[in-house]
C-alpha cells in the first residue's frame, strides 16, 4: 500500500524525483564558469592595460562582452532556451528586455532633452549661488 503513492510520485516527477526541467551536467557548469571568468578578465585587462587609446572603443567592447556574458549565464546556469517551460521563459525574457529598453531609452531621451533646453548660467551667477 505504501508503494503505490511512491510509484505515482516517481512517474509524476521522473525517476530521479525532479520535475523534468533540464539541469546541466558538471561539464556544462565548468564550461559556463570558465567562459564567465574569461569574459570578466578580458574587460578588466582592456581597462588596466589601456589597450586602446580611444576610450569609446574600450567601452563598446566591454558592453559587447557584457551582453555575451549575459547569454552565457542564461544558457549555462539558468538553462534558458526557446523550448524550456513551453516557451514561457523566452516570453518573460523578451518582456524584460522590452521594459529595460523602454526605461533606458526614455531616461537617455529625458536627460538629453533637459541638457539641451537648460538655461546656461553665467560665471557671475555661479559665484553668488548658494
Image (cartoon, rainbow, N blue to C red):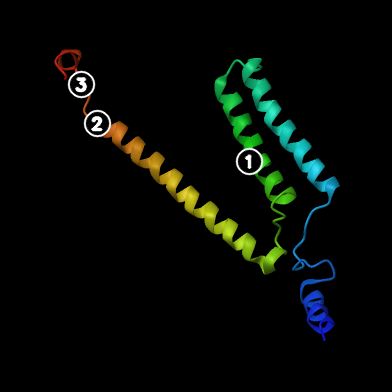
Q: Do callouts 2 and 1 mark residues in contact (Cβ within 8 Å)?
A: no
Tell me which corner region of the image, top left, top right, bottom left or bottom right, holds residue 66.
Answer: top right
Mark nearer the viewer, 2 or 1: 1
Q: Compute the Cα span from label 1 to label 3.
A: 40 Å
**Residue, disc 3:** 121
Q: Which residue is mark 1?
A: 67
| CA gap, disc 2 and disc 1 | 34 Å
Quadrant showing the N terminus: bottom right
User: Disc 1 vs disc 3: which is toward the camera?
Assistant: 1
Q: Give the CA separation, mark 3 to mark 2.
A: 9 Å
**Quadrant showing the C terminus:** top left
Element type at mark 1: helix
Residue at image coords 59%, 62%: 91
Q: Residue furthest front?
A: 1
Please rate how many residues cluster around mark 3, counting C-alpha atoms within 10 Å: few if below 14, some from 14 to 19, many from 20: few
Q: Residue at x 63, y 41 (%)?
A: 67
Displayed quadrant of residue 126: top left
- Pick whichever of labels 2 and 1 is earlier in the sequence: 1
Label 2 sits on residue: 118
- Quadrant in the picture for residue 13: bottom right
- Dot 3 falls on a residue whose secondary structure is loop
Task: Characterize the local packing of mark 1: few (<14), some (14-19) or many (20 or more) Cα atoms within 10 angstroms.
Answer: few
Query: 40 above or below 100?
Result: above
Amino acid at each position: 500500500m505504501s508503494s503505490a503513492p511512491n510509484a505515482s510520485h516517481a512517474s509524476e516527477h521522473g525517476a530521479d524525483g525532479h520535475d523534468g526541467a533540464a539541469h546541466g551536467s558538471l561539464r556544462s557548469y565548468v564550461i559556463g564558469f570558465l567562459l564567465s571568468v574569461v569574459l570578466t578578465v578580458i574587460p578588466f585587462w582592456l581597462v588596466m592595460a589601456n589597450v586602446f587609446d580611444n576610450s569609446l572603443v574600450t567601452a563598446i567592447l566591454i558592453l559587447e562582452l557584457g551582453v555575451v556574458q549575459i547569454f552565457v549565464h542564461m544558457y549555462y546556469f539558468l538553462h534558458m532556451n526557446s523550448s524550456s517551460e513551453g516557451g514561457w521563459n523566452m516570453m518573460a525574457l523578451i518582456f524584460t528586455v522590452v521594459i529595460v529598453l523602454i526605461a533606458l531609452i526614455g531616461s537617455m531621451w529625458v536627460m538629453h532633452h533637459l541638457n539641451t533646453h537648460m538655461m546656461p548660467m553665467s560665471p557671475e551667477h555661479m559665484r553668488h549661488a548658494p
